[in-house]
Amino acid sequence: VTLPVDKLKWLDGVCNCPAFFKKFMCKHVVGMATRLNHCKPPPATKNVKTGEKKRRGRPSKSKKALLIQ
């Protein structure tokens, strides 16, 4: 990822991932611009849940299929 020195021109950043070659913008350019304080993300992005952590320990044993009780 390469960003210009000027903070206002962060949209002209360059990346070598396939998404950038297709759309001329990718998550890497946006992420680096956010991290370097070139832009500020909207407050709605902080409310998005990224997923739950995996439970500790060994997974439970699967139930017997087609078993009549």
Image: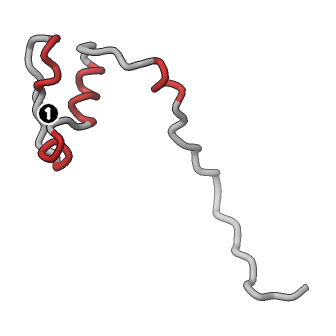
Q: In this view, does 2 lie above or below 21?
A: above
Residue at left 70%, top 75%? 62
The residue under the point 28% across, 15% down is 39
Point out residue 38 in the picture as x, y percentages from the top left corner.
23, 14
Which one is in front, 46 or 52?
Answer: 46
* Observer-nearest of 59 and 45: 45
Which residue in the structure is indicated by mark 1? 1
> x and y percent of residue 26 in the render?
23, 37
- Quadrant assignment, res 68: bottom right
**Residue 19: x percent and y percent?**
20, 46
**Quarter assignment of residue 31:** top left
Q: Vertically, is 28 above or below 5?
A: below
Location of the N terminus by quadrant is: top left
For this rendering, which residue is in front, 12 or 57?
Answer: 12
Q: Which residue is drawn at 24% across and 17% down?
A: 36
Left or right? Give the position of 10 relative to 31.
Answer: left
Question: Would you place residue 49 above or below residue 41 in this image?
Answer: below
| Number of numbered discs overlaid on the protein picture | 1
Crowding at mark 1 (Cα within 10 Å: few <14, some 14-19, many 20+): few
In the image, is 35 to the left or to the right of 49? left
At horizontal 54% and vertical 43% (from top left) the residue drawn is: 51
Q: Relative to 60, is 34 on the left or the right?
A: left
> Disc 1 on helix, strand or loop?
loop
For the C terminus, the quadrant is: bottom right
Name the residue at the right extreme: 69
Three-letter code for the amino acid on which mark 1 is drawn:
Val
Q: Position of residue 8 (x, y in %)?
A: 16, 11
Tell me, what colour scheme is on the image?
A: secondary structure
